[in-house]
Image (cartoon, helix red, strand yellow):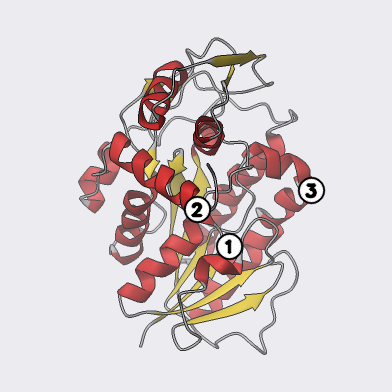
Amino acid sequence: MKTALVTGGAGFIGSHLVDRLVSEGIRVVVLDNLATGNWDNLAHHDEQHVTRVLWDVSEPWPDDILPRAVDWVFHLASPASPVHYRRLAVQTLMVNSVGTKHALDFALRSHARFILASTSESYGDPEVSPQPETYWGRVNPVGPRSCYDESKRFGEALTSEYVRTYDLDARILRFFNCYGPRMQAEDGRVVPNFVRQALQGEALTVYGTGQQTRSFCYVSDEVDGIWRAAVADGIAGEIINIGNPEERTILNFAEMVADIAGITLQIEPRPLPPDDPTNRCPDISKARRILGWEPRTDLRVGLEETFRFFRSQGSP
């Protein structure tokens, strides 16, 4: 039986990835310090299929309780929302730098494929739209978002160097605004914010003019892209956008959320946070070409599933 190690596997995307790996007949070892993850996300898996290890991957790894070798290392550990990475700013810098090095070294020793979960935040507040992987980005290196943006960019640089220097079979995936069940209600991102507020009959908090754009990718589509990248041959060193190229304004998105919730849209305007990107839209031509991947889930369908999840968690 093949084995995969997933850092951050108790988190939102990580736990859905674990589900997919188990469905593919793969044994999974999860390392997570539960800073933003929750073992409840993996409660439906038994120890025969998923081994849980409570660990901060920024610390030296516990080789005595890890398998001697694995087939894949998926490095997803990191706070991913502004609320969490500002609360855990130093830890975010460490997990995406020191933690990435530990994960790379483990993959190298195991002769494993390495998949780095990076982010569209590598592009910062872009002057190019849609954003292709060749765009270098426009990032404030010392701003309030830099603990996340720049540490992810460093993780990309380190991974790329392991490919060049050690011939590691690694690939870098830049995720764009993934959403779906198991998101945390209070994590500050626009989807859980809007869904929670709509279910409670509150005004939806819109920052700035609401004309800034995002593109939303449902989690099962995102995971399918990760899996395709993991099993694809001959793509060592590639950087690939994984996201939905359907771009829409935040105000347009708020209208859809209110419609699904069956409420009259009310907006609570707030100032735009520093360095908040004005647009976000992936060019996925590379993912289509080398992975045969593109998102399949209609935004309204994905949002309805997300509403069902939040209701199941006790939201009104």
Query: On the rendered structure, is 32 left or right of 258?
Result: right
Residue 143, horizontal then vertical, whole percent: 73, 28
28 lies above or below 145: below
Task: Tell me how far mark 1 sits from mark 2, CA to CA.
Answer: 10 Å
Q: Which residue is mark 2?
A: 117
Q: How many marks?
A: 3
N-term-proximal mark, 2 vs 3: 3
Residue 177, horizontal then vertical, whole percent: 46, 38
Query: On the rendered structure, is 47 left or right of 292?
Result: right
Residue 48, horizontal then vertical, whole percent: 46, 89
N-term-proximal mark, 1 vs 2: 1
Report the amino acid beneath label 3: Val
* Secondary structure state at the residue bearing disc 2: strand
Q: Which mark is residue 80?
A: none
Residue 103, horizontal then vertical, whole percent: 59, 67
Q: Which residue is mark 3?
A: 90
Question: Does residue 129 appear anywhere in the picture?
Answer: no
15 lies above or below 308: below
Q: Which residue is mark 1?
A: 8
